[in-house]
């Protein structure tokens, strides 16, 4: 009878140890699931941010290209304008010299 009591006591101690280990494992599992959930959430946010940045960068790149093309076009227009102003000044200056500086109609 004593040996059965000792065996029951040992079995109860084993059960307590196993229950404690099970609770510890449940706590660790819960913590890891929460960590995994946070990781997934962070990953989703980072993926969205990366996509948004990619779209923004592409738009900036397109804007830069179109602005550079417009600038080149305006430089040509500016050169033509400068040449036209010089020709006008030469023309007006040349005809004004013939009339003594007076403008005639």
Image (spheres, rainbow, N blue to C red):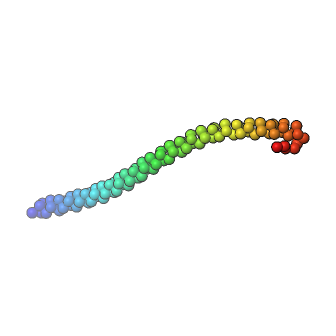
Q: x%, y% of residue 28?
A: 31, 56
Relative to 5, is 61 above or below?
above
Kindly identify the residue that appears in the image at 55 percent across and 44 percent down.
63
Q: Is residue 104 left or right of residue 22?
A: right
Kindly identify the residue that appears in the image at 34 percent across and 56 percent down.
34
Determine the residue located farthest toward the right in the rendered image: 100
Image quadrant in which the C terminus is located:
top right
Q: x%, y% of residue 14?
A: 21, 58
Of 102 and 23, the residue lying toward us: 102
Kindly identify the residue that appears in the image at 30 percent across and 55 percent down.
29
Of 12 and 50, the residue lying toward us: 50
What is the quadrant of residue 92 in the picture? top right
Q: x%, y% of residue 50?
A: 45, 47
What is the quadrant of residue 15 in the picture? bottom left
Kindly identify the residue that appears in the image at 71 percent across and 39 percent down.
81
Image quadrant in which the N terminus is located:
bottom left
Of 72 and 34, the residue lying toward us: 72
Q: Is residue 8 left or right of residue 84?
A: left
Q: x%, y% of residue 46?
A: 43, 50
């Amino acid at each position: 009878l004593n040996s059965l009591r000792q065996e029951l006591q040992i079995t109860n101690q084993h059960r307590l140890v196993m229950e404690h280990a099970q609770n510890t494992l449940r706590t660790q599992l819960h913590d890891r699931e929460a960590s995994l959930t946070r990781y997934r959430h962070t990953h989703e946010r980072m993926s969205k941010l990366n996509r948004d940045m990619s779209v923004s960068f592409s738009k900036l790149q397109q804007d830069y290209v179109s602005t550079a093309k417009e600038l080149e076009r305006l430089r040509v227009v500016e050169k033509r304008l400068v040449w036209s102003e010089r020709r006008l000044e030469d023309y007006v200056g040349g005809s004004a010299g013939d009339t003594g500086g007076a403008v005639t109609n």
